[in-house]
Image (cartoon, helix red, strand yellow):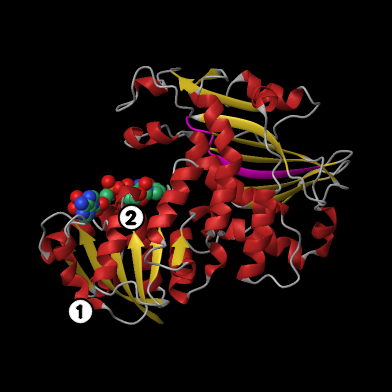
Amino acid sequence: MLECHLILLGATGDLAMRKIFPALYLAHQSKLLAPIISAVARSKLDNETFQDNLTKKAQEYIPNLDPQSWGLFCQNIRYLSIDLTQPDDFKQLQHRTLPNTLIYFSIAPEFFAMACAHLAQVGLNAPGVKIVLEKPLGSDLQSCKDIYAQISKYYQEDQIYRIDHYLGKQSVQNLLELRAKNPILGALWNKEQVDHVQISVLETLGVENRGGFYDTAGALRDMLQNHMLQMLSLIAVPTLKNPNAQALRDAKLSVLKSLKPLDFQAFVKQVVRAQYGSSDGLKGYTQESNIPAQSQTETFVALKLEVQSSMWAGVPFYLRTGKRMGSSLVQIVLAFKGGGALILNLQPQYTLELNLKGVPPLQAHLDQGMDAYEKLILEAVRGNPALFSHQDELEAAWAWVDPILKAWEQNQVPLFTYPAGSFGPKVAFDLLESEGRSWHTPKDGYV
Ligand code: NAP
């Protein structure tokens, strides 16, 4: 069992309760991790009250919670009321500089710099201390650099673990492994064989209770700039002979840097932004709570891009993501020249499908493996950076996305509307159909 001291900043928050504590509990229950947890938030609670609240949430979020193993897990949790704006409050952590300390920042990014400074004052930036950062890490290239400039005053790059929970999914990690273990797939994975690639991340959910946050972000920042470009980079890297963390990060960075920049002509022709409108009893985006009636924030984006590497030059990559879609789906399609396709459904089920001409589709159901947060926390505790993004990757992704954001801010590109519960506006279908292609539809229809 791995031992660690985990300081969880934002321990009373939604993410901590819904994802982080359940992941830590699962890792403890599986005897993979023995964490001592300092649960930190602003609320003035005693340990008992915090634990009562935590247990109520655990009963809600962890299926078939076993009271005995939950009780054992909770024995090593201590709640500390610390206001991130009050340096003196951090003295409570002073005697907690235990070996293998990981500090999880499940707090709003505007607190990152202040928290780093105050943690450093009590020695919690010593070499070996690791910090885990949640998205969003900036809202454009400059703000991403600004956040890093602040954090890097106190922590070295190799102490920083940036969470992109898509990278924790077994199905996403398998994008590399599939090719490495099956040279036949590797042989199909290039511009000679592939006509085009599709990546879809569709959600039936709307903005739920996170409207205030979402309206400042939108689909491009919230989903495409990070999760989808990370998935794209894993698809587009060459098969690595020695896939260590450094080689993988370098290869992903090289893909992100080789994305063909979009000019104004391209924004109009290749990028679709849209927002859901009311339909069939579902609210439109601007009727959701905490969304201004005049909001121009996109809840859907579809675009075509090109990876200008020797492996992919000339092959279009089509990406689309949206909220309030007709179905929830995370899917990657490699459509082959002359017909046929390899389809990886990553969510809700993990399946690999091979469509060949003249035979019915072949489908295999695969194991989703460990929960993504559990996997990522374990890898951070182990000090394995392979599943976390480097600052250079973030900056390369923002550098590519920034001109699109600027064109949108200046209202140079129309904002389309699509009915809630549909698959996006017609222009998103035209994007492919005008080139003799179409978005892949599951053979049994969408679920
Ligand atoms: P949240 O529910 O608003 O929780 C915020 C946490 O920060 C609470 O524990 C709060 O403590 C604490 N906090 C706020 N001000 C503080 C202060 N001055 N001193 C000490 N603690 C303070 O937010 P969340 O949804 O959990 O999100 C946390 C972070 O993860 C955000 O950066 C968010 O963007 C990111 N994220 C969230 C999700 C998600 O699904 N929720 C997904 C991806 C990324 P009190 O309650 O005691 O005030």
Q: Amino acid at mark 2?
A: Phe
Q: Residue at (48%, 74%) from the top-left corner? A: 383
Above/below status of 415 relative to 203: above
Q: Residue at (44%, 22%) from the top-left corner? A: 296
Q: Residue at (45%, 68%) from the top-left corner? A: 156
Q: Nearer the viewer, residue 82 or 17?
A: 82
Q: Are marks 1 and 2 in contact (CB under 8 Å)?
A: no
Instruction: From the viewer's perspective, tell me whether residue 241 is left or right of residue 75.
Output: right
Q: Which residue is mark 1?
A: 95
Between marks 1 and 2, how big is the CA–CA gap? 22 Å
Q: Residue at (80%, 53%) from the top-left corner? A: 189
Q: Residues within 10 Å of mark 1 (few under 14, many from 20)?
A: few
- The residue range painted magenta reads 322-335
Above/below status of 403 relative to 240: above
Q: Is residue 334 magenta?
A: yes
Q: Nearer the viewer, residue 76 or 4?
A: 4
User: Residue 347: in sight, yes or no?
Assistant: no
At mark 2, the secondary structure is helix
Above/below status of 283 relative to 152: above
At mark 1, the secondary structure is helix
Q: Is residue 234 magenta?
A: no
Q: Which residue is mark 2?
A: 112
Residue 447 is situated, as x and y percent measured from the top left of the image, at 56, 36
